[in-house]
Image (cartoon, rainbow, N blue to C red):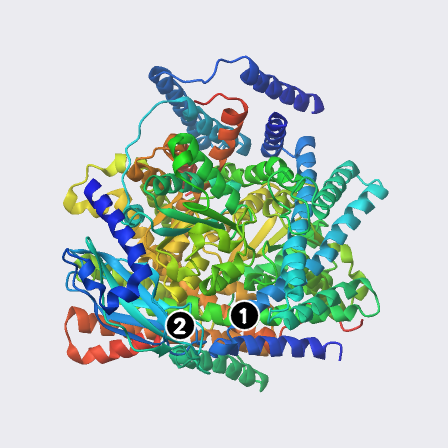
Amino acid sequence: MLNRVLLLCLALVWTVSVSVTAQDVAEGGIDTLSLPLPAPAQNVVAANHVYDDGEVIDVNWDKSPDDPENILGYIVYRAETDGAFDSIRTLLPGETFFSDDNVEDEIPYKYQIGVIGENGVSLSGESELAVATWELFNFGMWNTFLWMFVFCGSVIGFIISAKSGRKLYIRKIGGLEALEEAVGRATEMGRPILFIPGILDMDDVQTLAAITILGKVARVVADYDSKIRMPVSRSLVLTAARETIKESYTSAGRPDGYNEDMVQYVTDEQFGYVAAVNGIMVREKPATCLYLGAFFAESLILAETGNSIGAIQIAGTARPGQLPFFVAACDYTLIGEELFAASAYLSEDPKQLGSLKGQDVGKVIAMFGLLVGTAAMTLSVAWQVPATQWILDLMNNLFTTN
Amino acid sequence: METFGIWLAALLTIGIISFLYKDNVLYKACESIFVGISAGYWFITYYWDNLYRKFYLGVTDMDNPHRFFLWIAFALGVMMLTRLIGKIGWLSRWPLAFIVGATAGLYMMTYFVSNAFVQVGATIKLPPDFGSVGSYISFGMIALGTFSGLVYFFFSKEHKGVFGGTAKLGIWFLMVTFGASFGYTVMSRMSLMLGRLDFLFGEWLGMIN
Amino acid sequence: MKTKEFIVTAIIIVVLLLCKFVLPKPIQFSPTISWIVTILLGLVFAFIFYLTIKGKPVERRIVFLLVGISLVVPFFMQFKLPLKISPEVQQVYDKLASLPPGSKVLASFDYDPPSAPELQPMAEAFVKYAFEHDIKIIMMGLWPQGPQQANQAVEAAFEENPALRDQVKYGVDYVNLGFQSGNEFVVLRMGESFKSMFPSDLNYTPYDSIPLLKNVSNFSNIDWSINFSAGKPGTVEWIQVAVDRYNLPMSAGNTAVQAPMVYPYLNAGQLLGLMGGMSGAAEFEKLTNLPGKATTFLLSQTFAHVVVILFIIIGNVAFLRSRKETK
Amino acid sequence: MKKQIPILITATVGTVLVLSVFFPPAKMLGEDFSLFFDIIAVFAFFLGGGNLVRVHFIKVYRRKSDWVYSVVTLVGFTMMLASGLFKLGGPPGISGSVTADGSYLNTMFIHIIAPLSSTMYALLAFFVASASYRAFRAKNREATILLIAAFVILLGRTPLGMMATGWVWESLSIFQIPNLAVWVMNVPNLAGQRSILIGVGLGVVAMSLRLILGMDRTYLGGDND
């Protein structure tokens, strides 16, 4: 062990000194080393990385024949057309590829690979000059583009078809059916409804979903003449929530029922917010608590406190880690996708329901991919059916990002 | 000062824990301290980090190619404040519209690629240990579970018959996921309290070796 | 009601003051007393079991009290627990151990004090191991309090092995770049250049005058990276940007809650090893042969787990019995 | 008009950012957005902080119940603002870090915010236990499966699992609870996670489309102002 460490240290000293004098060694100072060196790497090829912003050059090489027993690693050297070589990265044995993402565009670079042995570094030949260039369209993402096109197309298609009056069936979603009942109960009891939109800001999609649902909930609240209480932890959410509730009250025909104090900013600090919400819960005893949005550790603190005051609780989040607590402690839970579908479902607007149909098309595509892909893999790998290999390749091409 | 700090922290810790018994004076005090101090802290961090460092230093740096963009951001920010002026309050919707549009646009792609797309691709990729009987079973179960889970989320069809059966299987897989997360979480939560108790009994009272 | 509250508060204060000023310290139970305490706790549970089956479930405050006791009591006990090294943790260690001296490691501390009980032991073991094996650490944080946690880990390493204080030089062997806001975009920009996101380190030393960073411009100069993560932004963001876009080799230490979400990436080979929660930390401490807090806490934690498991069992047995009776 | 322009902004910005992914030279746009967002968020905080001050000030002014606590909040808030804006106790000058060691802001953080937030977080230990006792019951088949999975992981991630099933023969080692836990994590858990992730991915796209197309626009407020 100690020997190995010592040798490694030695190799490192070598690395440093060689990287300084790489050019000399390459040009003929070979005799300075009397001990045998590992065989150098071969066929160093540098090429522009395609479909990017002109920031990457890919370098490939063939392994040294001494890899992996007698070498400690590789060093990548780089130089401009007439410049000296600098070491830019050390790699472990077995590597044959390096993406240099620290290049200026339009400047040609050449590369050289050093193999670190126990007695020193042996250098490969230089690669051809390569220039990083940018491309306008990322053809590497053709499959993403294709699926995006198909998926968005089907969403929009269903929206148009719904607009033209076609009836669309959407199954009942328990948690959302219960929403109106929960608001009704709060009205009967004369207690407020607590709406918690998660703890992230407006730049999180779950918060966006929460705000869109808030619009529908506030509408029901306005219709029932109930009270809504909404402490928030982000200022932008405060602004957005106020606009949303105001709009809901206006469209319910009760603009006078809206009051700015329905929404209150507490603090950005996660647990400071939770402490305050807990306080609000035990003191004001809301009859219904809605937790919709991005939740982290606070999910169970909120849900258990809500439980201890006997509130009806409906929760929804896309975070798998918090779902079990909501499932256990709340009356209804919207799981993942259901959270994002909720506002469309609640709107009962046929156009928005159409978008849910479009989502199903996406699921059909995914299920189709899974089914064909796994079938092809089973046939080609497990039972060696040669004809299915191309199907497997096709599926992999269709569902692999670059 | 250090001793005072420890005593203060201990007092605040006990104050929060006392909420478990019931809402009380000490908890209310801790809560209001917490809200006031932390709101101030976050504002200060935002102020220096975003307004001073990102904006001010950004626009005064003549080499910064994004200078022009920063001014647009600044203008949008100022529009946000028009909410305070009754007449042109509607201007505050512009930055809001901007943020909603940008978040929707940006995450539409991110989620589509790294959630939907990549996950389908990963399921039909050859696992590294493919070959043993166990790996066949695991591979099949992952595919089956993902498939039936998707069936559960299907909106267009009622959960009846074969379709309903598959959806049911999907729920079971989801339940295993939830159970696994729960099992993991329990452990983590216990360690958190350990940290606090270690502070109270170790650092403060000095009872632990 | 008010007097009752007052009396309870008074008793608690008196007990705490007694603990602080009167009791001998530190307290350690002999094995016999440890066993007696454990058995007493068991008896309390048997009683709760009896009550629950009789249809009189105990109040939540009793549950709280029991959890509290079973977390505190093991602090003073001395039992040893067996530990099985899981392959994910082994993978992290193997990766760390395979690094030659002088390698540059990027360590991102993406957590804050609440998650420290789980992640700090991992961070401390990692920092100490790296210092002892001459592995250079570049520290940073995507969470505002991350860099402070990093400094604490360094301090802990020095305290445990004072010889390191002289051997390990700031700026040469490790550097703390501090916190930068912007979540995954910080990582994205770091892919272009570290300096653009961290013009100076935590002590306001300019990036270019730090010897360790002399040849470090972006991820391509980093040999390995480790990420201690308690949520978002964290391991997932690092994988999505640094690993997927820039091929940074990365392992991670996560809180137990976060870990299940990272498993898909581990499975897909994007992540090279994972330490999950306190037991992950204890396993890592065992592998690096640097026992720390995680090993000590594991007993308390085991007690707490038993308590939770007992509560689940009690709740369910009572529930199944009551269902039988109504049938 | 007042409503049309915001809808147009949402649609344009959204579309541009979706497309920017496919055009490498435009990929900086996404990063620029985070900069935009940060700057707008500071201004929004003037509204949030203003709201905080207003709510508590009214409470104090009208002597509502528990108004004393509002005084505490207000004092804490202004104290932090003062020490942060003037960088009390920290390195002098405008470029010094406001949270440097020794600054008042940092001291407050370490001795007040950190213990409070850690403890609040830690309360979860208790809530987890009470939820286990009360809510995690084998009410039906689904709940039973959840319970079993939770149990396997709970045991498998602690030394308990090893103690309980360490004796199982090597050939059946998958049934040792720690191995079983790894299998549960890697197989059925992964499958469940994937279906949730795929669903969420599609849900986000559809919701974003609805927002970009202006179908869902309650967040833009009422028409009449």
Residue B160: mark: none
Residue D162 vs A361, above or below: the answer is: above
Which residue is drawn at the image coordinates 58% and 68% (left, top)? Answer: D33
Residue B120's x, y, as percent?
Answer: 36, 69
Q: Which residue is situated farthest in the bottom direction here? A: A164
- Give the camera-side residue of A218 and C91: C91
Q: Establish if C110 lies above or below A25.
A: above
The answer to whether residue A77 is left or right of residue C189 is left
Q: Is residue B97 above or below residue A227?
A: below
- Residue shown at the point (50%, 63%) measured from the top left: C189
The mark found on residue D30 in the picture is: 1
Pointer 2 chain: A
Q: Residues within 10 Å of mark 2 (few under 14, many from 20)?
A: many
Q: Residue C221 appears in which quarter of the rendering?
A: bottom left
Q: Secondary structure at mark 2?
A: loop
Which amino acid type is marked by label 1?
A: Gly
Disc 1 crowd rating (10 Å Cα; few below 14, some 14-19, many 20+) is many
Q: Position of residue C171 (x, y in %)?
A: 46, 46
Q: Is residue A48 left or right of residue A245?
A: left
Marks 2 and 1, how far apart at CA: 19 Å
Residue B116 placement, left or right of A38:
right
The structure residue drawn at horizontal position 41% and vertical position 58%, both measured from the top left corner, is: C215
Q: Identify which residue, A37 or B75, lies in the foreground.
A: A37
Marks 2/1 in contact by CB < 8 Å: the verdict is no
* Mark 1 element type: helix
Q: Position of residue A271 (x, y in %)?
A: 59, 44
Q: Residue D58: image x %, image y %?
A: 82, 46
Q: Which residue is mark 2?
A: A56
Of tags 2 and 1, the one toward the viewer is 2
Residue drawn 62% across the image and 64% down it: D37
